[in-house]
Amino acid sequence: MIILEDVAKNYGDTHVLKGITLEVRKGEFLSVTGSSGSGKSTLLNLIGGMDRPDSGKILVGGEDITAYTDDALTLYRRKKIGFIFQFFNLFPNISVFENVRIPLLLNEISDEEAVRRYIARVGLEGKERRYPYQLSGGEQQRVAIARALVHDPEIILADEPTGSLDSRTGTAIMDLVRELAGETRKTVVLVTHEAHISAYAQREVGIRDGSIV
């Protein structure tokens, strides 16, 4: 599903990723672990098409996304990727329903039933008209999970999804992510520095100083 071939990324004189070679199978739940600054979030951004490598190839579904134009990368992100971030990245001035619907609007899809279905699936039925500030951190992350799944992407990318949550809430969120990933058979790549979060994945790889270890 995802193949990285000798991928390198530099920011100025800083070599963030150094010849990364990695394969993620379709439907696999993979965790990438490493300390802050190890390069794991950069790796996720490259897979998600939010940045480009300086060298190497990234193949997704057999297509070389490093050769995509900017417009093609935008469509790739909209259609194939669902993002879950540490700080939720919800729009504060629109409701839960409207936040979840954003990927459908971007893809010109009218399916309000899907929005309601995913809001209910993440345990927020009845809170569709609330705003993010009216929700707990755990509830906000549940909104973000529904938003990541509503447009039926092939890949879910989760960047420290429990980093802003207490341990109990974080465990509940990871239980939900694992359950939904299994139900929908998505390919999931999770980055984390926490061993108990990494344990939710089927397979773990470590990254240190920009290299897989």
Image: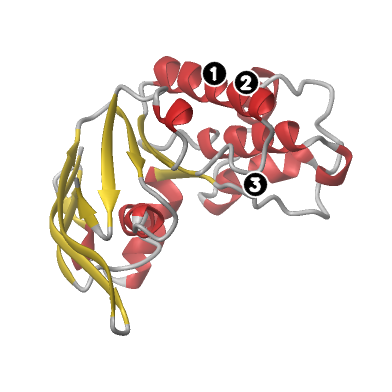
In the image, residue 156 sits, relative to residue 45, either above or below, namely above
Picture coordinates of residue 16, whole percent (x, y): 30, 67
184 and 192: which one is in front? 192
Instruction: Answer few, some or many: residues within 10 Å of disc 1's Cα (few below 14, many 20 plus, some between 14 and 19).
Output: some
The quarter of the picture where residue 182 lies is top left
Viewer-side label of 2, 3: 2
Label 1 to label 2, Cα distance in Å? 5 Å
Instruction: Check residue 88 in the rendering and tell me which mark sits there, or answer none.
Output: 3
Residue 113 seen from this side: no
Picture coordinates of residue 146, whole percent (x, y): 60, 32
Q: Are marks 2 and 3 in contact (CB under 8 Å)?
A: no
Residue under the point 62% across and 20% down: 172
Label 3 to label 1, Cα distance in Å? 17 Å
Picture coordinates of residue 206, whole percent (x, y): 27, 42
Q: Are marks 1 and 2 in contact (CB under 8 Å)?
A: yes
Mark 3 or 1 closer to N-term?
3
168 and 127: which one is in front? 168
Residue under the point 27% across and 60% down: 209
Residue under the point 50% across and 49% down: 107
Mark 2 or 3 closer to N-term?
3
In the image, residue 107 sits, relative to residue 32, either above or below, namely below
| Disc 2 target residue | 172
| Disc 1 target residue | 175
Q: Amino acid at mark 3?
A: Phe
2 and 6: which one is in front? 6
